[in-house]
Every structure is written in structure tokens, then in C-alpha cells.
Amino acid sequence: MARRLIVPLALAACSCVWTFQNVEVTPLERRPADSVSVVSPVKAHLADGSTVVFPDGAELFHDTVWGAGTRYDLTLRDSAAVTRLPLDSVAGMEVFRTRVDNATSIVVSLLATGGAALGTGLLAVAIFGSCPTYYADSAGVLALEAEGFSYSIAPLFEARDVDRLALAPGPHGAVRLEVRNEALETHDINHLELLEVRHAAEETALTDERNAPLVVRDLRAPRRATDRLGRDVRALLAASDGEVYRTDARVLDRARGGDLEDAIEIAFPAPPAADSVALVLRLRNSLLNTILLYDVMLGDPGARSLDWVGRDLERVGPAVELAQWYQRRMGMQIAVWDGRGYRHVAHLKDTGPIAWKDVAIVLPVREHDSVRVRLSFPADNWRIDRVELADRFRHAAPIAHHLTDVVDAAGRADTAARASLAAADGRYLETSPGQRFTAQFEVGAAPAGDRRTFFVASQGYYTEWVRRGWLLAPRTTKTFVPSDSALSQAIARWRVTQDTLEARFMAARIPVR
């Protein structure tokens, strides 16, 4: 049966998901865990690649996991009963939702017969995290194109994400995307397809904040752009050149308590006789929301996070509370000046810290001579590379290209995997850390006279592994509660770790095989 998206305010559509391993960033000390009973069914993923399944939950006491479990080897063919497990052998634990009867019901992926040995050395540096990452060939080298359904951290947050691609089809009209799981998490992908928008050479095709295609033209740079301190930041926003806007250190230093936001005010000349325009942004998140989502939310409570994900977020009430708070406090709020004050017109969800996101947001023209826009967001939550205004835009109906083939890492076609991804029907392709596959689409020859822009559309959710360091030494005995206090705590940690984390983050991916 297909799963309905019960929570319409689900945590962002993009970006993916970000995790930390043993990152001590505040004066707070982790302390040895007391006994914690987990009632949700859990899997313990071991450093040697084997998996222990506890269908009735488990109890964690100091350095040991106790429970009625079954251990499956690397190939998932052989099994043995387990009643205790030393935590120093565990890479991470995750909740699962499938009734376990035998080895076939816990296979981590349709693409492989088993997992991979992660090794203790890898666990020590595994701070990279993401939803599925998409790569395409660029002059013989695989280049990152996008990241999918960011922050869909539980089934009720399952979301559809649409990301613009820079690739061009091969000479025979084929598009190939390598889909990777490069983090300590399990990805459940429900649907994967390719969208195409055809447009004139002078137009640019993007998505809006709701993932709908929007074609823009006649782009102009701001005539004024100032940050919260009054600094002129036009040069940082003028071009896609890697010279990005980030919150000034002085604003970040004083972001605490009830004052957690940064803002940019931007002005453009209003086009004659226009009642609406499109704001064009190129941006991605910093690692601030990584700290919030996967250090504060999951890391601090340790083993208690397993039941928070496996039980609390399975209920509509807690899921809606979390989604509404995240919608209100995170992402980016966009307001337009109407002559008396700034009026909220749109919200842009967080997109993730790996791939750049190009997005266009339709705005009303409220003054006859100018369009004044205010972008507000948690301090240092964004890296903004370009801001422009499109005088003209149009909505576009995309052409959908269905999946032609799924090829596993060994080059074998996998018809079962393709069937799982063909439609948003509740059949999921599940991938584990280090796995990859290639999605192939046939898009035909290029049309005469038109340009074509492609987008990857993906839908699913992921389950984060609760790391061994979190299990051994949580910081709190309570599960996460959405609050400004939690965001303030994340910002405080980010202030003192940002340089170190940014330097290490991209180098700490789980290698694919």
C-alpha cells in the first residue's frame, strides 16, 4: 500500500541530511549512559559489516546492548542468536519498520547481498551525511549534480524533491545519474524520474520554492543590497563565482536568546507595468542545520533518539509539531516592502550543504518604482552566491522521462530495483552506506531550435544511524523538543566549530563501492 504524505510541512525538500560523529563542540561533557530501554525494533550495524536485528527492541547499559537478537553475517546468508553485544563493535543503530521473519526481510538493499565492513578508522571521521547524492559524467569525471529529499528523516516526512541538473544527454539521447549513499544512514527511495523543460536560448529554467518548473528571462542584479550591519554586499551577490554571502562574524557572535536571525535587504528597479517578478537565487546551506538536526536532535539524547524516530515521529501530533517549528524557524523567510513595512510572501526550505540550489520565487510588485525584498534566516544558515531579479517569467509544464534501467555497482541490470523506483507507490529501494547504482533515462534527440534543461525528481525518506559515540555518552536524558533554545544551542556550537567542520566535512564521505 502506498504511504500518504501526512505532514505537508515536512522538513525541507532537499538537502539532504547531515550527521556528526564524536564532535565535541561545547563545554558540555558527554557522560556514560545510564540504562536505556528502546522499545522500537532496531538494527545494530557492526564495524565488520554484519547486522544484528532486535525485533522487540533492546536495552543499553553502559557499554553493552542486551536483547533477543539475530546476527547476520556480511552476506546476510548465515545467522546466529545474540543476547548481548558490546557497544565498541557497533557502527550505529537504526530503527526499522519491517516485520522480521528471516534473512531476506532484513536485506539492506535490493542492489547487494550484504553490507560492507566499515572499520573503526572510518567511524572516527564519519561526519559527512546526506540524503541520496546524484552524480553525472562531466568530461570523463563524475561531478556532483544534486542532493535529494533533504531532512525527510522519517516516513511521515517523506517528500518529493526536484533539483536542476547541469548535465547534457549523451550522443544517443541517454542520461545517466549515479545515485550514492555516502553517509551512515539508510535511504528508502520511493520514486525517481527525470523531468525536462524546453525553452528559448535566452531563457533559464529553474524550480520555484514548491518544486514547480519556472522559466525566467531578463535578469538584473540588485541596485542595493545591505546586510544587518548595513554593509554593502552587492559584490558578493552579483555572480555565480564562489564569492558568497555569509553572516558577518559580529552578527553570529551575538546570536543568542531571542535574537537568532540575520537579514539582507535588497532593492531592484521595478519593471514598467509589471504586477509580479521572480527573485532568482543560487544558494546552499551552511553546516549549521547539520549540527541542529544531527547533533542536537539525535546525538545529545543518544539511544533515546531511536524511540523518538521510531515511535514519536510515527505519530502525527509530534511530527506536525516538529514540522511546524522547523518551517517557522529554519529555511529562509522572504518579504516584500509594500510602502509601510515588509510583508511575508514566501518561505524557502533548507536545501542542504553539498550541492548548489538554483531557485526562482515569484514576488508581487507592491511599489511603482522599486521592488524591495528582505531575506531573513537563522544566523549563518546560508551561503548565497547570486541574487537577481527576472522581469519576466512563465510557468512551464515539464516532460516526464521514466526510468529505463537501474544498473548496480557491478554493471548488472536490476529489474526489481527499477520496478521499486518506477512510481510513488510504496515500493522502496533501500540502500545502505557505501552503495551506489546508476539510473538510466532515454530522452531522445535534442529538439530543433529549443534548449532543454533537465531536473531529477526523487521521493523518499531516510533513517539516520545513531552513532556509537552518541550511544555510549549522551548529553541529555530527554528526547528533542522543538524550541528556540535548541536552535540557540546549535548556533553556539556552530560558532566555535565552523572552520574545523567545513574543512573536514567533504573529505569524510563514506566511500562507495
Image (cartoon, rainbow, N blue to C red):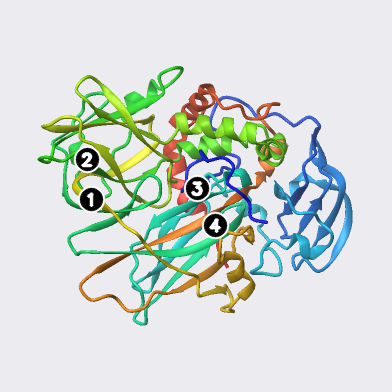
Residue drawn at (81%, 32%) of the image: 35
Q: How many C-alpha atoms fall within 10 Å of the one at disc 1: few (<14), some, or many (≥20)? A: some
Of the residues under marks 3 and 2, which one precedes in the sequence? Answer: 3
Which comes sooner in the sequence, label 1 or label 4?
Answer: 4
Towards the viewer: 369 or 185: 369
Image quadrant where residue 196 sits: bottom left
Nearer to us of marks 1 and 3 is 1
Do the residues under discs 1 and 3 have CB atoms within 8 angstroms? no
Amino acid carrying mark 3 in the image: Ser
Sooner in the amino-acid sequence: mark 1 or mark 3: 3
Give x and y (percent) for residue 503: 43, 46
Q: Is residue 428 left or right of residue 58?
A: left
Residue 341 drawn above or below residue 25: above
Q: Please name whichever residue, 44 or 197, is drawn nearer the observer in this view of the structure.
A: 197
> Which residue is at the far bottom?
172
Q: Distance between the residues labelled 1 and 3?
A: 27 Å
| Residue placed under numbered mark 1 in the picture | 393
Horizontal placement of 275 versus 159: left or right? left
Q: Do the residues labelled 3 and 2 touch (CB within 8 Å)?
A: no
Q: What residue type is labelled 2?
A: Ser
- For the residues bearing labels 1 and 4, Cβ distance under 8 angstroms: no
Task: Please determine whether, in this image, residue 417 is positioned above or below residue 477.
Answer: below
Res. 496 in view = no
User: Which residue is found at the position 37% from the left and 38% from the top?
Assistant: 382
Indicate the secondary structure of the residue bearing disc 1.
strand
Residue on which disc 3 sits: 150
